[in-house]
Amino acid sequence: MKTPRLNRKLVLEELLRVPDGMGGFTESWVSKGALWANLDARGAVERQVGGRTLSVSKFKIITRAAPFGADSRPRPDQRFREGDRSFDILAVGEYDDAGHYLEIWAEEGRL
């Protein structure tokens, strides 16, 4: 297995929900920091959502590893942002046997 080329700077974001005082809440994404990554497009699918067609691109993203529980370790309830693009994290696992890198499966284009 060759060493991945981490050539894209992605911002790791987490969803923050704040009560709005009327029984609901407001949502906003907050930065948890930046990670260097390798993005590899893995195909796309189209889905029908609310009577319209939505195109969803799938990606494998490689980053340096971080211990479980660390703020810098991505989780499936988070996303990456690169400018106007966002990548919703679906799953996270070890990329290599030595545990130096993480493999993250993500989708771009979801609602």
Image (cartoon, rainbow, N blue to C red):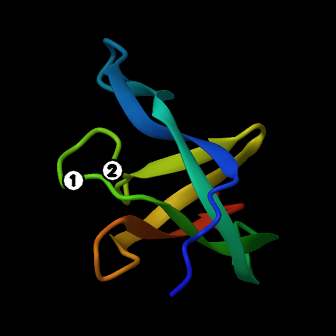
Q: Which residue extends farthest left? A: 69
Residue 95 shown left or right of residue 87 in the figure: left
Q: Dot 1, how many residues are within 10 Å of its Cα: few (below 14), some (14-19), or many (20+)?
A: few
What is the x, y in percent for residue 106? 55, 67
Asked whether 107 or 71 is in front, the reply is 71
Residue at 67% across / 65% down in the picture? Answer: 39
Q: Which mark is residue 52?
A: none
**Residue 4, above or below 34:** below
Q: Amino acid at mark 2?
A: Arg
Marks 1/2: CA–CA distance? 7 Å
Residue at 79% across / 72% down in the picture? Answer: 55
Residue 67 shown left or right of residue 64 in the figure: left
Residue at 18% across / 55% down in the picture? Answer: 68
Q: Which residue is mark 1?
A: 67
What is the x, y in percent for residue 17? 36, 29
Image quadrant where residue 4 sits: bottom right
Asked whether 55 or 51 is in front, the reply is 55
Q: Dot 2, how many residues are within 10 Å of its Cα: few (below 14), some (14-19), or many (20+)?
A: some
What is the x, y in percent for residue 26? 44, 24
**Residue 89, above or below 97:** above
For the residues bearing labels 1 and 2, Cβ distance under 8 angstroms: yes
**Residue 21, above or below 68:** above
What is the x, y in percent for residue 104? 47, 68
Q: Which residue is mark 2?
A: 73
